[in-house]
Image (cartoon, rainbow, N blue to C red):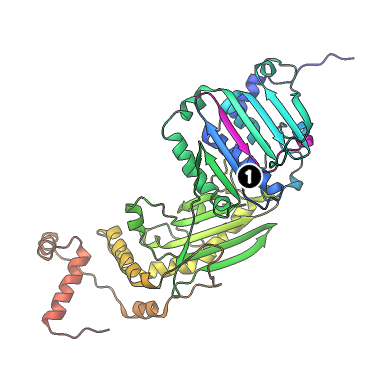
Amino acid sequence: MPETVSFYPTKKLFIEVLTRDISIRDCIFDLLDNSVDSYTRHNVVDTRQIVVSFDSASFSIKDNCGGISKKELLSEVFRLGVVDTATQAKTIGIYGIGLKRSIFKIGTNIVLETDDGSDYCKLVIDDDWLKAEDNWAIPLSETSTSRLDGHKPYTHINITAIREEARDLFVAPFFDAALRKNASIYYSWFINEREIDFVINQEKIPGYEIRVRASDDYKPVRHQENFDGVDIQIMCWIDLTDVEEKRKRLERVEVGWNVFMNKRLIVLGDTSELSGWTGERQYLPRYHPIFNQFRGIVLLSTEEPYKLPVNTLKNNFNPESKVYQHLLTKMCEVARPLVNYLSEKYERSKKRMDNTEATVTRDIKDDVDEQRKHLKESTLTKAEYVTQFVPPPAEEKRRRTDTTIQYTKQKSRVALVKKILDVNSNWQVGSETFEYFWDGEGLDDIK
């Protein structure tokens, strides 16, 4: 019998490498995702709950979303990597590392209890296991038939011996508030549809909701298809609310693209090249304030989550994904008529090189005030969509009759006229002096 050379990593190295490149915040979201995925895999139809609590001494997450079977706990849950990707549901976890790296990043003493309605299991990971370098197996501390006694199947993870990095964050005054805000956005679909209630440090989280605000003149557009096993819905519309007023009130504004993947809001208010705002002909122009009224929503759904174009941190696109490349083209195709319309609609504003953003804001506000009385508001699922965007007839007429006047004058003279007219920009000087001439000559207004 030949002698063998040990190839096992030390547990310390294993844990340090596994947890190095993930934040505490992302660890908590990995654990939340495990609970949400359990809800999905068990096909739960009533409202369930996930409760998170933490302080300097401990971290706890408990859900009643279905529990973990004894078979899964013994053979899959603590293995590094998934055993079979073909048996997935509409979940988000695909690599099989989230639970392990999350619990070890937070602390070193872990107690997991679960009851799926058939079996109760309890597992303990402590210093004794960490020191036993030759023994990687974790025995169940306790197991029996189900102890639910009328309660919902559950999983409870409690972590103590909190690591210093996590302990410092858990007592920081901003951390739990930021966590609630992020959870409100990321899990907004589950919250708003009353599928799962999320509670963090005894505070129930409200869901962030994207509303479709449009009118008969600005009907929202929807495109639907299936590509490589992924159901795709792309919805676009022109939002007739005042963006700047919402920002002044510190309200979140979902300008640009918002992308849900298996009901998680992965991408929020994106106006970057990743969502097509590249300036290249085959995509969309670079983002500009004239597009502040554009809203784009993408819903991706699949029972093969490894096909979702999401990065490993689940907070943005994976640009190397085949689905992403196809999706980006479709997003730009659906959005192009609306983007072109806004570009033409505010063409005069965009061409004014002085005080451009203020000018655009004013022009958009004028349009918002005009359309507000016709505004209709609904949820994403209940809005009335059309297959193709058609500009309002009145706007078509206005674009045909309006034109631009440009001329150059001495800077000091223009500055003096600005002061006399009490205006802030050169285009206002041109507009006011034109109206002055028109009125002085007694010309009738042309409609």
Seen from this angle, which residue lies furthest right? Answer: 1
Q: Residue 428, position in %: x, y? A: 20, 66
Q: Can residue 31 be seen in this view?
A: yes
Residue flagged by tag 1: what amino acid is it? Val
Residue at (16% x, 85% y) in the render = 443
Q: Quadrant of residue 433?
A: bottom left
Magenta-drawn stretch contains 63: yes
> Which quadrant: the C terminus?
bottom left
Residue at (20% x, 63% y) in the render = 426
Left or right of 220 on screen, residue 101:
right
> Which quadrant: the N terminus?
top right
Q: Residue 4, position in %: x, y? A: 81, 16
Question: Circle 1 — which element?
Answer: helix
Magenta-drawn stretch contains 418: no
- Magenta range is 56-72
Q: Residue 127, position in %: x, y? A: 65, 17
Number of numbered callouts drawn = 1
Q: Is 314 in front, or is 138?
A: 138
What is the crowding at mark 1: few (fewer than 14 residues within 10 Å), some, or many (at least 20)? many
Residue pointed to by mark 1: 36
Q: Is 13 in front, or is 147?
A: 147
Q: Name above or below for residue 148 compared with residue 20.
A: below
Q: Is 231 in front, or is 375?
A: 375
Left or right of 113 on screen, residue 422:
left
Residue at (56% x, 29% y) in the render = 59
Q: Residue 186, position in %: x, y? A: 53, 47
